[in-house]
Image: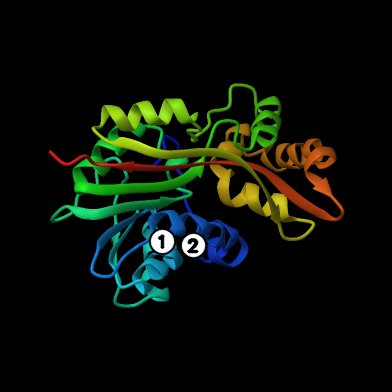
Amino acid sequence: MTSLKTTWNAQQYQERHAYVFHFGEGILEWLAPQPHERIVDLGCGSGQLTARIAEAGASVIGIDASHDMIVQARSNFPGFDFRVGDATTFTVERPVDAVFSNATLHWVKNASAAAQCIARALKPGGRFVAEFGGHRNIRAIYTAIRAAIPGVQFPWYYPTIGQYSSILESAGLEVRQASLFDRPTPVEGEDGLDDWLNMFCREVIDQAGPSRRDAVQREIIEKLRPTLYKDGAWSLDYRRLRVVAIKPTP
């Protein structure tokens, strides 16, 4: 779902970065899945939130661009409908009641194409409920990487409420709720930031070149230590955008 080639270690993702789907529990309250609804979990990862939606009695299709994530999701939750698919091109056999997405759409730079796909997947009156990185997400980390690697390319899309609302409206969706908020996110251990960079920024830091990569990552970590490392723990400077939009009835 990115312009850079992004690969995922699905096992490490669910073991060391479980906060991604644990924080997603909050956005499930905005989704409020109901029995017998058909729902797409777009960017389902290793499937934990897909399973939570199914617990409400909904029929869920989990879609993720990563084959490894889908393999892990199928292993975690056998019998669920998990599919490899891209946010900008996915299709469903018939329109669904809701499209849900957690911590995915900041990886999709072609937000307009994704919004069009989401709108097509929804039945009239259906809802789109999402949370992902918003404007100025990981600003300190972003700035440190850019200083260490001149000309670096980033795979992320962090819109304002206004920017993303305009994209959804252009796709024919009606924004009902939107919220942009800080969420400082602790990561486990002295090597927590190193783990995070290896999981989510490997292809970004690889742009430093093979001979410099490890030294540049250490440089980034030390540059961030005064601001993001306190009381023996790292805390990431996350900002999240939550949105609910409806496909209007004719």
The quadrant holding residue 119 is: top left
Please name the colour scheme applied to the rendered image.
Answer: rainbow
Q: Amino acid at mark 1?
A: Asp
In this rendering, is residue 58 above or below 134?
below
Mark 2 Cα shell of 10 Å, populated few (<14), some (14-19), many (≥20):
many
Decide: marks 2, 1 in contact (CB < 8 A)? yes
- Element under disc 1: helix
Quadrant for the C terminus in the image: top left
Residue 197, how many percent across, how many down? Answer: 64, 47
Residue furthest out toward the top = 151
Residue 169 spot, x, y in % from top left: 30, 29
Residue 225 in the image, given as x and y percentages of width and height: 82, 42
Image vertical order of residue 209 relative to residue 200, above or below: above
In the rendered view, would you say 157 is above or below 193? above
- Which of these two is toward me, 39 or 187? 39
At x 68%, y 36%, the residue is: 141
Numbered circle sitting on residue 68? 1
Q: Is 194 displayed left or right of 59 in the figure? A: right
C-alpha gap between disc 2 and disc 1: 6 Å
Residue that badge 2 annotates:
10
Q: Residue at x 28, y 53 (%)?
A: 98
Q: Position of residue 137 (x, y in %)?
A: 60, 36
- The disc labelled 2 sits on which kind of residue? Ala
